[in-house]
Image: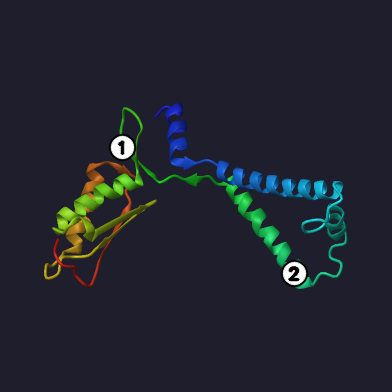
C-alpha cells in the first residue's frame, strides 16, 4: 500500500485532537471574559460580581494561606488529573467508529452503525425473528448481539454467531471483531 494511502487510512480511522483543544480554548476564553467583566465593573465603579480582580490575585499570591490542607490537596489533585487528561489527549489519538474492508485497489471503510445494521439483518434472518427483536452494537473489536426470541420458538445462539462471523468474513472486515450473542431468557410475542 502506498504511503499516501496509509496516511489517508490513518486519518480516516482516527479522530483528531481538536475537540480537546477547542474545549480548553473555550474554558480560557470564558475565564478571560469573566476577568474582563470584573475589570469593567471595577472601572465603572460598580460592585464586583464575585470578587474584584485584585482580590483574586491577592488570594492566589497568598496560597496556601488559611486554606484547609484538604481543600488544597483536592485542588492539586484536580489540577493533576486535568493535566493527565490533557496529556493523554495530546499524545494518543482517538478512534472513529469505523472499520476497514479489505480491498486491493483502494481504501474501503464502513461506519460501525452501518455494519451493525447489516449484522442485525443477518441475525434476524438466522434467528427467524422480527425487526424489533435484535439489537446489535459494534464497538472497536467487539460485536454484541442482544436477541429477544419469539415466545415458544427455540433459538440457536451458535448458529447466529456462525452466521454473523460468516457475514463479517464475506464483507472482508479488518480486523475481524469478536462476536458475542446474548439471548434473552424471556421471549416476546411474535411479530
Q: Residue at 72% x, 63% y: name it.
A: 75
Residue 175 showing in the rendered view: no
Quarter where residue 185 is shown: bottom left
With 11 as the anchor, is 132 left or right in this view?
Answer: left
What residue sits right under mark 1 in the picture?
102
Q: Is residue 116 rendered to the left or right of residue 126?
A: right
In the picture of the structure, the residue carrying the numbered disc 2 is: 71
Residue at 20% x, 63% y is 157
Q: Say if 116 sits above or below 3 in the image.
A: below
| Residue 27 vs residue 49, the one in the foreground | 49
Choose mark 1 or mark 2, whichever is in front: 2
Q: Is residue 77 left or right of residue 122?
A: right
- Provide residue 147's location: percent of width, then percent of height: 23, 62
How far, Cα to Cα, is label 1 from label 2? 55 Å
- SS at mark 1 in the image: loop
Quadrant of the rendering where the N terminus is positioned: top left
Mark identifier at residue 173: none
Q: Position of residue 160 (x, y in %)?
A: 19, 58
Residue 141 in the image: state x and y as whole percent: 37, 52
Q: Quadrant of residue 64?
A: bottom right
Mark 2 residue element: helix
Crowding at dot 2, Cα within 10 Å, few <14 / some 14-19 / many 20+, comes out as few
Viewer-nearest residue: 69 or 179: 69
Q: Bin the neighbour count of mark 1 within 10 Å (Cα to Cα): few under 14, some 14-19, many 20 and up.
A: some
Question: What residue sits 18% from the left and 65% below the top?
Answer: 149
Amino acid at each position: 500500500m502506498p504511503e499516501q494511502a496509509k496516511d489517508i487510512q490513518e486519518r480516516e480511522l482516527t479522530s483528531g485532537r481538536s475537540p480537546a483543544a477547542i474545549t480548553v480554548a473555550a474554558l480560557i476564553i470564558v475565564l478571560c471574559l469573566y476577568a474582563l467583566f470584573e475589570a469593567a465593573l471595577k472601572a465603572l465603579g460598580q460592585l464586583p460580581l464575585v470578587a474584584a480582580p485584585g482580590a483574586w490575585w491577592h488570594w492566589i499570591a497568598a496560597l496556601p494561606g488559611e486554606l484547609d490542607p484538604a481543600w488544597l490537596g483536592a485542588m492539586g489533585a484536580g489540577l493533576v488529573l486535568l493535566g493527565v487528561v490533557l496529556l493523554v489527549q495530546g499524545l494518543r489519538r482517538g478512534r472513529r467508529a469505523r472499520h476497514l474492508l479489505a480491498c486491493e485497489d483502494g481504501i474501503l471503510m464502513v461506519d460501525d452503525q452501518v455494519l451493525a445494521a447489516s449484522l442485525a439483518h443477518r441475525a434476524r434472518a438466522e434467528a427467524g425473528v422480527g425487526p424489533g427483536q435484535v439489537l446489535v452494537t459494534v464497538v472497536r473489536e467487539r460485536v454484541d448481539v442482544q436477541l429477544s426470541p419469539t415466545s415458544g420458538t427455540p433459538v440457536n445462539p451458535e448458529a447466529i454467531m456462525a452466521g454473523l462471523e460468516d457475514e463479517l468474513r464475506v464483507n472482508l472486515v479488518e480486523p475481524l471483531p469478536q462476536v458475542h450473542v446474548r439471548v434473552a431468557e424471556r421471549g416476546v410475542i411474535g411479530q
